[in-house]
Image (spheres, rainbow, N blue to C red):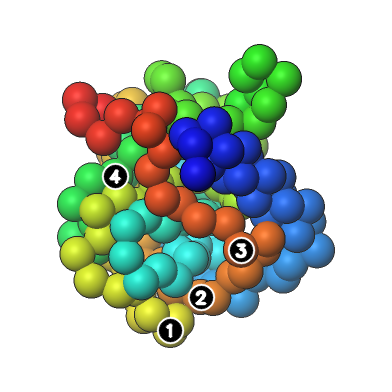
Amino acid sequence: MTTRTLLRAAVAAVAALALAACGSSGSGSTTSSAPAGPVTASDPWVKTAETGMTAAFMKLTNTTGKDIVLVKAATPAAGMVELHEMAMKDGQMVMQPKEGGIPIKAGASAMLEPGGDHIMLMDIPKPIAAGETVALTLTFDDGTTLSVDAVAKDFDGGNESYEPSPSMSMSGM
């Protein structure tokens, strides 16, 4: 397969995932191990994966009167973690790093979901199986952090694959 064919297949899979996600119901729950702070997380979950890459999803709610930005995420379940988005580029939906982080307006929520903004877990050292808990630490632009335990669950959603494409740089991000 050519690089272009692989990229088109990945884009098609993500588009199918976005459509499938509209009808899905989450079974995760808020499991933050930190006291309530300026941002809360609800329904955190991670897609199961054998190798390579996967993603974490949740609803983030800003309880303050000022805008806040998710600027970083970390987990021991991955060698590298990035904030990503789906964006239209040259007439196609592509996955790319989210420049500047994920903003959460004052008193509002941001959805991290399949087909949209999400947290990419790359270079996972071991499989993430259904029912496992994945600990995440989210860091915001005001310096606060939020610890979240996300439940791993199977999610076909178009059988998307989070394998890196040649255009996705694995260094310097």
Q: Could you say which is closer to the camera, residue 49 or residue 139?
A: 49
Question: Dot 4: what SS?
Answer: strand
Q: x and y percent of residue 135 in the render? A: 29, 64
Q: Is residue 151 above or below residue 96?
A: below
Mark seen at residue 153: 2
The first of marks 2 and 3 along the sequence is 2
- Do the CB atoms of the residues marked 2 and 1 lie less than 8 Å apart? yes
What residue is shown with label 3?
159
Q: Which residue is mark 1?
A: 131
| Front tag of 2 and 3 | 3
Residue 29 appears in the rendering? yes
Separation of marks 4 and 1 at Cα, in angstroms: 21 Å
Quarter that holds the C terminus? top left
Q: What is the crowding at mark 2: few (fewer than 14 residues within 10 Å), some, or many (at least 20)?
A: many
Distance from disc 2 to disc 1, alpha carbons, whole Å, reads: 6 Å
- Front: mark 4 or 3: 3
* Residue at x-position 29% and y-position 44%: 81
Inspect the image, locate mark 1, and give the three-letter code of the amino acid beneath it. Answer: Gly
Q: Can you identify the residue that label 4 sits on?
A: 81
